[in-house]
Amino acid sequence: MSGGASVLLDLLFPPRCAFCRALLRRGESGLCQRCQRELPWISGPAAEQKPEFVSLCASPLWYEGAVRASFHRFKFKGRSGYAQVYGRLTAQCVRDHLSGRYDLITWVPLSPERLKKRGYDQAMLLACATALELGDVAVETLRKVRDAEAQSGLAGGAGARRANVLGAYQAADPELVAGRRVLLIDDVITTGATISECARTLRTAGAADVLCATLARTPGPQKERPSAPFPPSF
């Protein structure tokens, strides 16, 4: 795009922060300085967890407040362009917690039915943006073969979520993952049921290890939720 066209687009559609939607100032890209200071960043051990079948999962943000609102626009309101800034944040989290521990990058896929309805796979967009920031590419390793009920709408806790996704995924190309260390990207981790089922499927297909990175994780008890005032190394 030419410089003139870019300026015109900025005048007609001024860029806004992906989180608070404030107009961005010169030098800001996707994220305003206020959100860079005040979003619920996670650092250190609080950013890490170990769902079943996953060696380590890391997330840079708590899923609350402006993060939750932003993600809802990304997932349900067509703001697919947010993937670029989300990818920067997720990639930095990968560098901080998972560097050198994976051979390929992939994502938790939508079912064909959900993809047709939404028009895009938000986890795929996040994985591709994250991989680009890391100088890599994301590849398809999983297919969702059963359109399970949305996890967010389930009652019954972690057990119900595990049962809901059991057998819902299939390895797209077992030879691609055999003997490889796989970095699985998803948007948000709650109980870890979906990520665990994907990791189980990948390990059954021969993956040597499965790690995970998500943009955000749901908050646990208050005493387990120390937040960093700034994003680590961002």
Image (tube, helix red, strand yellow):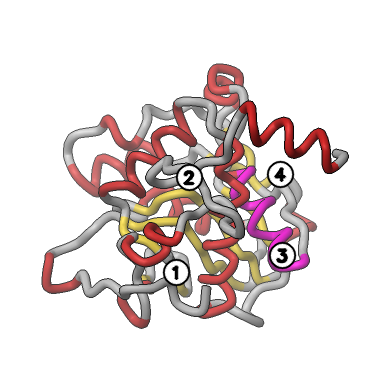
Distance between the alpha carbons at the discs numbered 4 and 3: 14 Å
Magenta stretch encompasses residue 131 = yes
Dot placed on the residue nearer the N-terminal end, 2 or 3:
2
Q: Residue at x 42, y 29 (%)?
A: 148
What kind of element bears circle 1?
Answer: strand
Name the residue tied to disc 3: 104
Sequence-earlier tag: 1 or 2 = 2
Q: Earlier in the sequence, mark 4 or mark 3?
A: 3
Question: Which image quadrant for residue 206?
Answer: bottom right
10 Å neighbourhood of mark 1: few (<14), some, or many (≥20)? Answer: many
Q: Determine crowd level at label 3: few under 14, some 14-19, many 20+ residues with C-alpha closer than 10 A.
A: many
Q: Are marks 2 and 3 in contact (CB under 8 Å)?
A: no
Asked if the residue under mark 2 is in contact with the one under mark 4, i.e. CB atoms within 8 Å, the reply is: no
Q: Secondary structure at mark 3?
A: strand
Residue 69 screen position, x and y as percent: 34, 39
Across and down, in percent, residue 100 comes to 66, 82
Q: Amino acid at mark 4?
A: Ala
Nearer the N terminus, badge 4 or badge 2? 2
Query: Can you identify the residue that label 2 sits on?
Result: 18
Residue range corresponding to the magenta coloring: 124-135
In 3D space, how far apart are the residues under numbered discs 4 and 1 (Cα atoms)? Answer: 25 Å
Mark earlier in primary sequence (4, 1): 1
Contact, CB < 8 Å: mark 1 with mark 3?
A: no
Q: Residues within 10 Å of mark 2 (few under 14, many from 20)?
A: many
Q: Secondary structure at mark 2?
A: loop
Judging by the rendered image, the residue that carries numbered circle 1 is 58
Is residue 226 one of those drawn in magenta? no
Disc 1 versus disc 3: nearer the observer:
1
